[in-house]
Amino acid sequence: MIRVGFRWLARGLCRHPEAATLSGGRFNPVDFPALVGVIEHPTRGLLLFDTGYDPAFLEATTPFPERFYRWATPVEVGAEHAWHTWLAAHGINDSDITATIISHFHGDHVAGMRHLAERPIYCARAGLTELRAPGRFKRVRQGLLPALVPQAADANARFFEEAPAVALPSGFAPFSEGRDILGDGSLLAVELPGHCVGHWALGAGAAHHAGSAHTASRRCRVARQVDS
């Protein structure tokens, strides 16, 4: 069985009325930390699940109309969130990162991609296509900032939609199908419709064999991200 290590790390935050994300929530602004999942795979090395905020977000939202994005969700990105400073604070070597997995292309999930664009990126084709579509005002309304994702990432993309489909263990209910993105059953991408185009979650667990009634249902767990 292939098991992976997983931990969440915060990298920057934004503030937004609680009611915008929680039914019955208050209209007072609350902090939403941007999370980065650190995955330790026994043969694939260190992978990141999303990248959190980065000073690049402030650069990308300086001009108009992109500045509306920053006004709508004020962010807190300090010197401690600079790439190498943040990595060092958490004991991560840049050279150890072998790939990035992107849940979706909102700015708080991909702001650090300029540091990772030359390495493999696992993502949804639908999400990347939407990011590259014309229309700056439309993209801002969708929370998309193409300047955060260098064009080099497109050539290095491995798409969820093209990975082998597998039946999911009961622990993933109500979802029944996932994508085996590494081909070894260790990481399963699961499409989550509703939040935005190309939004996927990530399941991590023991090796999974499609069609087997004795899959990793007791060992799998879903890595859930906080969406702003």
Image (tube, helix red, strand yellow):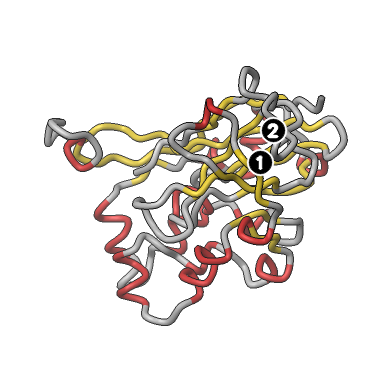
Left or right, 216 with reference to 195: right
Indicate left or right for 50 with 136 as reference. Answer: right
Circle 2 residues within 10 Å: few <14, some 14–19, many ≥20: many
Q: Quadrant of the C terminus?
A: top left
Q: Where does label 1 land, which residue?
A: 48
Q: Are marks 2 and 1 in contact (CB under 8 Å)?
A: yes
Residue kind at label 2, given as amino acid type: Ile
Above or below residue 38? Residue 123 is below
Residue 119: percent from left, percent from top: 76, 56
The residue nearer to you, when weighing 87 against 179, is: 179
Name the residue at 41% across, 34% down.
Answer: 33
Label 2: state its secondary structure: strand
| Image: 119 above or below 189 | below
Of all residues, the one furthest to the bottom in this rendering is 134
> Foreground residue, 186 or 212?
212
The residue tagged 2 is 39
Q: Position of residue 214 (x, y in %)?
A: 70, 24
Q: How many numbered marks appear?
A: 2
Q: Residue at x 87, y 35 (%)?
A: 43
Give the amino acid at mark 1.
Leu
Residue at the spot 44% in from the left edge and 43% down from the top edge? 77
* Real-space CA distance between mark 2 and mark 1, rounded to the nearest whole angstrom: 6 Å
For marks 2 and 1 on the same chain, the one whose residue lies earlier in the sequence? 2
